[in-house]
Amino acid sequence: MGTAADMNRFAGGCAYIDGDYCPTSEAKISIFDMGMTRSDCTYDVVGVWDGRFFRLDDHLDRFMRSVSRLRLDIGMTRDELESVLHGCVSRAGLQRAYVSMTCTRGRPAPGNRDLRTCRNNLYCFAVPYIWVSPEDVQAVGASMWISDMPASSAIPPMLRGVRWVSSRVLRWASGSLPSASSVARTSGSRDLSRCQIRAVWRRWAWDQACGRIQASGSSCRAILGQWCQATMKESRTALRAAGRSPVSA
């Protein structure tokens, strides 16, 4: 546990950022950080109950996988990160804690938008445990509404917390890619919405960036055409299931 002085200073929670610990109320991140401006980051959260982490190894493993897949660098080893999380909890003197770890793309060099100039940014914090449902609601049971809106298939689900991947990231990772407009011109894509076209393009970009596709020219257009047709088929099936008439080709 932290000292009495530590627990008084970190009463509201303890953060680790820029290589040092500070009260959560004093933690700061640049407004130019790509994690803020483009949601270019990944995170994980682990709970502490009665002074013990719950499945910390599993959470660390998942976080490090996400960091690796996004080509980020937390600037320390997995064991050092584990020590930082313990340090946040210890300094705050928490027995029940919500402990978060986040790695962002960071801030690019002044006057530059090249992501390779970014210094990745790791920050962690521990605050008193946060309930999704208040304890009084837990006693009687909570109501839940499950959305029927499908998640985008453009981003792999194993990337924890990611809901946006910049076309700039994908272009940097994979080199020359077909543009979204070229997808729109692909045979069969005229019935796709703009969002669907972007989703097909991002799926292509991500797969090529990960080395799953090695294609160009006519083979590239053929693959995009197949994906456009598959996306239209899925959309029409969903419309029919909802009792709506799909747009005819």
Image: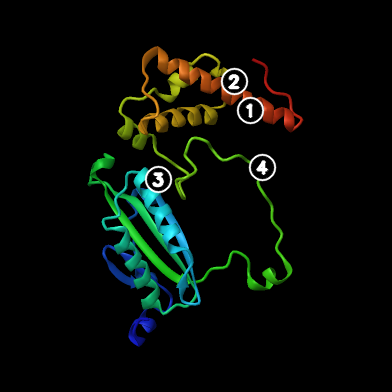
Q: Which quadrant holds residue 217?
A: top left
In the rendered image, the residue lying farthest to the right is 243
Q: At 68% across and 73% down in the image, what residue appears?
A: 136
Ranked by sequence position, the earlier of labels 2 and 1 is 2
Residue under circle 3? Answer: 38
Q: Is residue 238 left or right of residue 161?
A: right
Question: Who comes first in sequence, dot 3 or dot 2?
Answer: 3
* Rendered view: 240 above or below 218: below
Which numbered disc, 2 or 1, marks the residue closer to the eye?
A: 1
| Element on which disc 4 rests | loop
Residue beneath disc 4: 148
| Front of the two marks 3 and 4 | 4
* Residue 132 picture location, percent across and down: 59, 64
Q: Earlier in the sequence, mark 4 or mark 2?
A: 4
Question: SS for tag 2?
Answer: helix
Q: Tell me the tag on residue 235.
A: 1
Instruction: Examine the rendering and report whether any part of residue 223 can be seen.
Output: yes
CA gap, disc 2 to disc 1? Answer: 10 Å
